[in-house]
Image: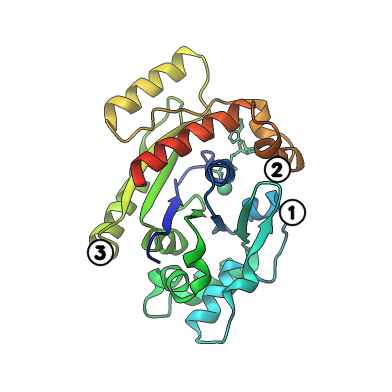
Amino acid sequence: MKNTKIIAVANQKSSGKTTTCVNLGAALALKGNKVLLIDFDPQESLSNFFGCYNSENNIADLMLKLANKQPVKAAEYIIHNELNGIDLIPSNNTDMNAFSRVILAKRGQETVLKRVLSRFAVFEDYDYIIVDCNASVDITVDNALCAANSVIIPCWAAPFNFAPLTNTINQIEDIREELNPDLEIVGILLTFCERTKNCAAAIDAMRKNYDGLIFDTTITRTARADTSLREKAAVLSTAKDNKTASEYRAVADEIVRRVG
Ligand SMILES: Nc1ncnc2c1ncn2[C@@H]1O[C@H](COP(=O)(O)OP(=O)(O)OP(=O)(O)O)[C@@H](O)[C@H]1O
Ligand SMILES: [Mg+2]
């Protein structure tokens, strides 16, 4: 995987991770990049967004086949989304839960996704692979962080306790120390931003606490970011004047500057 940038999108708390994966993926594709999204959450939100439900060819099945040394073709797991110009490997609730249980008994349990991505030549075609994590610190998130070069942490910009963010950063530091020394935090992306004093205070506190890590661009809370799945799927490619889309295009510019 010479030039492919693998980015995990992680936070223990629900914070716009899946929305970030979709919009950032489409924004990077609009810049001419070949982008693959991997749904790594048993909730299947990212898969559902692209109309995939309960997919037989899903990332957990691919990982389990590799871990069990069964023959498998990764290309058969990739779905192309014409509208947004991006590819997807879907999740599957049953298989992701089976993966989490079965893999704990095996050696190299944290590095299955890493091995999948380096085993198959098809993944070398991509400029960016973006992995949508679930809201926890479990073995699947460990796998995403071991496979990734970098992490984006979307974070709800509201007065809140810092515990979920701190736990996520601690998990990233553990993985960096023990398994993936090159793992970098690309940045913390402030999401659900509103024009309120509370929100301004939260943004201010975040910038002070995590100096240099916070993206300049923030994502505004807007109903257009939270429409029905079908409408959302069309937002980026058709409505170029859409606020959410233009904010994520600005984040994509910052990411390209930060990770190349
Ligand atoms: N900028 C935004 N403005 C308004 N609503 C948003 C915005 N971003 C995301 N949402 C909505 O908020 C909800 C949570 O967002 P999302 O699913 O992206 O978060 P998540 O971190 O992936 O959650 P989970 O941890 O459950 O996977 C969704 O209904 C989504 O459509
Ligand atoms: Mg999600």
Q: Which residue is mark 1?
A: 51
Q: CA distance from mark 1 to mark 3?
A: 37 Å
Q: Are marks 1 and 2 in contact (CB under 8 Å)?
A: yes
Q: Residues within 10 Å of mark 2 (few under 14, many from 20)?
A: many
Q: Is residue 149 above or below residue 23?
A: below
Identify whether 100 is placed above or below 67.
above
Q: Is residue 115 left or right of residue 247?
A: left
Q: Of helix, strand and loop, which one carries label 1? A: loop
Mark closest to the chain's N terminus, 3 or 2: 3
Q: Residue at x 28, y 65 (%)?
A: 179
| Mark 1 lies within 8 Å of ligand 1 (Cβ measured) | no
Mark 2, residue position? 233
Q: Is residue 108 above or below residue 224?
A: below
**Which amino acid is tagged 3?**
Glu
Q: Position of residue 123 (x, y in %)?
A: 50, 67
Q: Which corner quadrant holds the N terminus?
A: bottom left
**Residue 226 coordinates in the image, percent (x, y):** 67, 33
* Res 52 → quadrant: bottom right
Q: Residue furthest front?
A: 32
The image's mark for residue 178 is 3
- Residue 83: x and y, percent? 71, 47
| Secondary structure of residue under mark 3 | helix
The picture places residue 135, in percent across and down from the top left corner, at: 50, 49
Residue at image coords 39%, 49%: 151
